[in-house]
Image (spheres, helix red, strand yellow):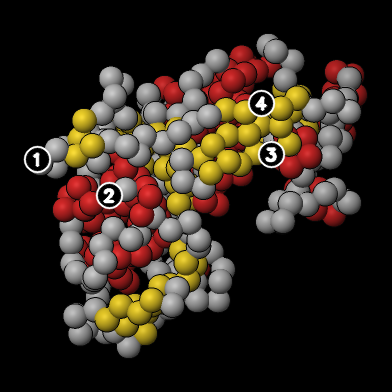
């Protein structure tokens, strides 16, 4: 089987030079970054860390920030957490130049993108349920996600109509991926690639309940908003080849990508909003914004000794070369914040939130 290989170089602009005034000299095209939080719960410390790095990367290059609320899931729309996210970013000292934009207001753009892909014969209906896929012997990724085995890929229009009649539910829409490997250079993690059919399979564009998939929406929105730099957690590194391929098929530009390491719970699992891990609300009861930013700045290698500091004060100190690449376990106990094997004694003697 012939597998096409496509390598795409997307270097981060980490060579901007600071002037004495703390601004930067940038290339002719300004950098545009984005915050793209999901209002599914209160931000945890890992979300704050990624947002801080994204903001510093853009501001250190005299760029612009866009705020986009990713509320595709109806359970997240116009609830309490979207306003809380905005308030939390302001509390941290992270500002933006455009937005907030809401994905729930942009559904027509996603429909247009699906039609464009369908016109290339890349879209097909899928009647498989999540339970059926997990129960089947379909291959699984290391993170537990099912790689779609192509069950509905070759259904004829007549077979699809019969399947729709028999199931009595609308189908999901999947994207027919080619025999192709997409490789790109991440601005922080280096070269990364995936064989599309082997490593992710035909992925969803729209769920059976009508909700558009994350992979489609972010590609459409980043292009429409002029985003040139995407900075996010390394848990989304494996989404990037799919998004790059989608950009190619839709004729959209490729932004630069930089993926930052994750902050983990003491037991090594990823922080999760649903578990209220290192929730910002609890941290706010014990830390000022500058104290919290100072802890994260030390973790990021931007300062060598702990001190409270604002994001604005970190701009002239920021460099991608200083950031670690490994994930980091974090916990608070008895007024001491511990990252990796590095222990930082905070000068603030208030009780710290429980882990």
The residue at which mark 2 appears reads as: 318
Percent across and percent down for residue 327 are: 50, 62
Percent across and percent down for residue 282 are: 32, 71
Residue at the (17%, 50%) spot, across then down: 312
The residue at which mark 3 appears reads as: 194
The residue at which mark 1 appears reads as: 21
Which residue extends farthest left?
21
The residue at which mark 4 appears reads as: 6
Q: Nearer the viewer's eye, disc 4 or disc 3?
A: 4
Is label 2 in a helix, a strand or a loop?
loop
Instruction: Choose the circle earlier in sequence order: 2 or 1.
Output: 1
Instruction: Choose the circle earlier in sequence order: 2 or 4.
Output: 4
Considering the image in quadrants, where does the N terminus appear? Answer: top right
Percent across and percent down for residue 176 are: 75, 26
Q: Nearer the viewer's eye, disc 1 or disc 3?
A: 1
**Residues under labels 4 and 1: Cα distance?**
42 Å
Mark 2 surroundings within 10 Å by alpha-carbon count, few (fewer than 14), some (14 through 19), many (20 or more): many
């Amino acid at each position: 089987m012939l597998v096409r290989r496509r390598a795409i170089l997307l270097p981060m602009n980490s060579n901007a030079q600071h002037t004495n005034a703390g601004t930067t000299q940038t290339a002719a095209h300004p950098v545009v970054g984005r915050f793209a939080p999901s209002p599914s719960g209160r931000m945890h410390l890992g979300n704050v860390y990624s947002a801080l790095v994204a903001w510093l990367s853009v501001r250190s290059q005299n760029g612009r920030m866009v705020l986009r609320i990713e509320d595709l899931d109806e359970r997240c729309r116009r609830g309490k957490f979207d306003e809380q996210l905005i308030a939390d970013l302001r509390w941290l000292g992270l500002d933006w130049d455009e937005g907030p934009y809401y994905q729930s207001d942009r559904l027509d753009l996603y429909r247009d993108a699906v039609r464009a892909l369908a016109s290339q014969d890349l879209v097909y209906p899928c009647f498989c349920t999540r339970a059926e896929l997990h129960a089947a012997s379909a291959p699984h990724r290391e993170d537990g996600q099912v790689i779609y085995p192509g069950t509905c890929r070759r259904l004829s229009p007549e077979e699809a109509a019969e399947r729709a009649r028999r199931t009595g539910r609308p189908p999901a829409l999947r994207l027919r991926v080619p025999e192709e490997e997409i490789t790109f250079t991440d601005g922080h993690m280096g070269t990364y690639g995936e064989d599309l059919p082997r490593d992710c399979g035909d992925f969803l564009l729209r769920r059976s309940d009508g909700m558009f998939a994350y992979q489609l929406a972010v590609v459409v929105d980043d292009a429409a908003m002029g985003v040139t730099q995407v900075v996010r957690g390394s848990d989304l590194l494996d989404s990037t080849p799919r998004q790059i391929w989608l950009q190619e098929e839709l004729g959209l530009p490729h932004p630069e990508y930089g993926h930052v390491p994750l902050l983990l719970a003491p037991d090594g699992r990823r922080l999760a909003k649903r578990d209220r891990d290192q929730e910002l609300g609890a941290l706010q009861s014990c830390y000022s914004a500058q104290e919290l930013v100072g802890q994260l700045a030390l973790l990021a290698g931007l300062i060598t000794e702990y001190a409270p500091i604002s994001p604005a004060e970190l701009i002239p100190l920021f460099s991608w070369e200083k950031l670690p690449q490994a994930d980091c376990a974090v916990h608070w106990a008895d007024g001491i914040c511990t990252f990796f094997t590095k222990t930082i004694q905070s000068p603030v003697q208030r009780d710290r939130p429980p882990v």
